[in-house]
Image: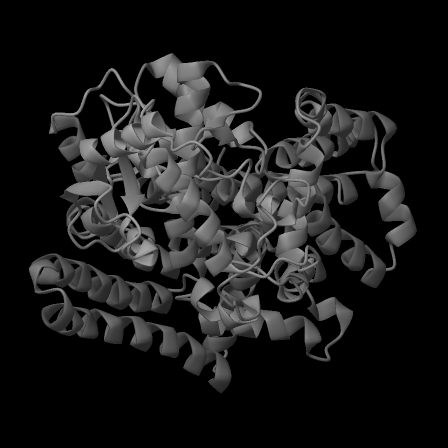
């Protein structure tokens, strides 16, 4: 017979699952594509389905080799099965990955510290703003984070089997470990092996189980499974295009700073971004990070604490040595950070009941900070975004109620359960934010209006609509009547980094941007004067047109200029007939 405690635990897990579904599936398709990563994911999937490019997709009329294909295959398969092409379908794999990670975090947290730790960890992960924002958009990082979490969960089950010594039953976990690594490799390359290794190897070394642990994790059949999965795409691609090896090398080398190509924007070490990535649980996260470093007996430390520490902190240190490490690179480490926070929250709650002053102050700080945010939100909205004032007020009231309810539930003796009202208010805020506020605000990033305008203009849809160099890939998703093609000679072979590094390519090893513009300007001008051109219209970024100055005066006429956007605005240009006619006459006289 299930006890009252068992029923209570089942109910709390059901609430966790419900909140996760609301947070990550609610209003998932209400916002237009707006981030570069999900624009590219959508464009790749569309090309895969429309052109049957399952091996190598194309975007911008060039091979897209920089990222492995598993997320693209998943989105393309969903498009094929449902016959739908919309934002909801594009984002669904990442959203499902988020829900899966919350389940894995609960399971791992429960095995490390009990049900309360598992529940607190899942609730913490469900309410991290960075995690929510990243997993509600398409890309490779969300699925990579899921497979990383699955690999570490499977490794834990292999290293710490329930019951007796590892046997045939426990071996299935090591096979799952390698399956997860292989699928992660197909998602974003070898980085998953590095991140999992940086979590597991130091943990085993500190626990003085390195030799035994590696013996349990190294499995011949598992390695074979990993290799078959990991190489199932790269090998056919190399056979089809040998340049792929150089593209992949440059993709990794640029991030680590060994390619010799410097990015235009300086990025500070990733640790600078860490506080907002841990919001709103920054103080709990900091306390959890310090916890393993405090001199206390090993008996007092939860089993697996160092695994979580190296998963979340060790990888952060590694990324700080990369030249270009963006916050989304840290996403696969966030589940480890969430369990660390879950452990610390439960410890603080129990210490606060024993009247430990520091624990009391830390818990109260979070309640006060969140309640202050609820008060300040409407004030800030009234000054910066007055059109969202009412919606922000509704969110603020929900958050304030959640804070008060959390404190009352804690006073009734709940530890992890005290987080449920807070996370419920966050889930409600997500629905309001993404369903009411975001659609109006993100229109300034979207390409929907531009695509509708281009479709309505009197442009011959039988001829491709050309573009100079590159465009944001969101236009491919929304444009219905026109095929987009680059102005010949102006687009990269694979990407700008490859072109800069490829000395064998004519006129492409030009590190000085001004010199590159001169070369590309000449190509574009020559194309406008070519009487054999079938297409007369082309798109160009406003900033590129301004860089060209007066070079195109008299050669082209602006047909449509996009209004101000929070991205690169585009201009539709038409080649003047007299420019072509004049050039043809000059050729005849010669």
Q: Residue 23: give x, y in percent of width and height.
A: 32, 45
Query: Which quadrant of the rendered structure holds the C terminus?
Result: top left
Picture quadrant of residue 292: bottom right
**Is residue 576 at least partly visible in the picture?**
no
Q: Is residue 389 left or right of residue 216?
A: left
**Is residue 473 placed above or below 589 in the rendered structure?**
below
Residue occupying image coordinates x 16% and y 63%: 397
- Outermost residue to the right: 211
Residue positioned 42% across, 45% down in the render: 522
Q: Residue 394 vs residue 572: left or right? A: left
Expressed as whole percent of the image width and height from the top left, the position of residue 501 reads: 65, 48
**Image-quadrant location for residue 20:** top left
**Front-most of residues 585 and 281:** 585
Which residue is located at x 21 percent, y 63 percent? 401
Q: Closer to the camera, 369 or 31?
A: 31
Q: Residue at x 64, y 39 (%)?
A: 247
Q: Residue furthest front?
A: 589
Q: Going by the image, does 200 lie left or right of 562?
A: right
The image position of residue 578, as x and y in percent, is 19, 34
Decide if residue 425 is in sight here.
yes
């Amino acid at each position: 017979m299930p006890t009252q405690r068992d029923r209570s635990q089942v109910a709390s897990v059901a609430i966790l699952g419900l909140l996760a579904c609301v947070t990550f599936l609610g209003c998932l398709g209400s916002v237009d594509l707006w981030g570069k990563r999900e624009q590219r994911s959508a464009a790749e999937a569309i090309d895969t389905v429309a052109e049957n490019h399952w091996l190598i997709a194309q975007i911008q009329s060039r091979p897209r080799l920089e990222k492995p294909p598993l997320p693209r295959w998943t989105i393309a398969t969903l498009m094929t099965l449902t016959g739908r092409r919309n934002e909801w379908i594009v984002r669904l794999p990442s959203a499902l990955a988020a829900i899966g990670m919350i389940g894995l975090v609960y399971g791992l947290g429960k095995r490390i510290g009990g049900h309360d730790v598992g529940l607190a960890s899942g609730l913490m992960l469900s309410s991290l703003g960075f995690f929510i924002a990243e997993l509600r958009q398409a890309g490779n990082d969300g699925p990579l984070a899921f497979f990383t979490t699955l690999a570490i969960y499977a490794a834990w089950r292999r290293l710490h089997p329930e019951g007796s010594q590892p046997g045939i039953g426990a071996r299935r976990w090591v096979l799952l470990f390698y399956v997860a690594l292989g699928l992660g490799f197909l998602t974003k390359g070898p980085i998953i092996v590095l991140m999992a290794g940086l979590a597991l190897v130091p943990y085993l070394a500190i626990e003085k189980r390195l030799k035994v642990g590696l013996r349990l994790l190294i499995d011949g059949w598992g390695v074979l499974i990993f290799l078959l999965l990991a190489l199932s795409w790269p090998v056919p691609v190399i056979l089809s295009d040998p340049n792929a090896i150089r593209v992949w090398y440059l993709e990794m080398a640029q991030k680590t700073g060994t390619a010799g190509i410097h990015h235009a924007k300086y990025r500070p070490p990733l640790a600078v971004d860490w506080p907002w990535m841990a919001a709103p649980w920054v103080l709990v996260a900091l306390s959890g990070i310090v916890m393993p470093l405090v001199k206390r007996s090993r008996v007092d430390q939860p089993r697996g604490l160092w695994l979580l520490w190296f998963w979340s902190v060790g990888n952060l240190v590694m990324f700080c040595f990369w030249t270009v490490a963006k916050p989304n690179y840290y996403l696969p480490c966030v589940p480890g950070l969430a369990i660390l926070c879950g452990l610390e929250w439960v410890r603080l709650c129990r210490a606060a009941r024993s009247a430990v002053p520091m624990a009391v102050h830390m818990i109260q700080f979070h309640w006060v900070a969140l309640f202050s945010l609820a008060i300040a939100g409407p004030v800030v909205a009234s000054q910066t975004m007055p059109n969202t004032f009412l919606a922000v007020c509704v969110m603020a009231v929900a958050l304030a109620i959640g804070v008060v309810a959390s404190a009352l539930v804690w006073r009734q003796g709940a530890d992890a359960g005290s987080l449920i009202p807070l996370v419920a208010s966050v889930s409600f805020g997500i629905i309001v934010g993404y369903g009411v506020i975001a659609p109006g605000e993100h229109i300034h990033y979207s390409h929907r209006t531009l695509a509708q305008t281009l479709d309505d203009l009197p442009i011959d849809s039988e001829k491709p609509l050309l573009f100079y160099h590159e465009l944001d890939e969101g236009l491919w998703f929304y444009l219905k009547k026109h095929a987009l093609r680059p102005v010949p000679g102006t687009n990269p072979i694979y990407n700008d980094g490859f072109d800069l590094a490829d000395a064998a390519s004519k006129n492409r090893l030009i590190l000085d941007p001004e010199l590159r513009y001169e070369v590309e300007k000449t190509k574009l001008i020559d194309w406008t004067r070519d009487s054999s051109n079938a297409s007369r219209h082309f798109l160009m970024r406003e900033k590129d047109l301004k860089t060209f100055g007066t070079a195109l005066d008299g050669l082209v006429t602006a047909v449509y200029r996009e209004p101000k956007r929070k991205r690169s605005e585009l201009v539709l240009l038409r080649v003047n007939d007299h420019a072509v006619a004049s050039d043809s006459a000059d050729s005849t006289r010669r």
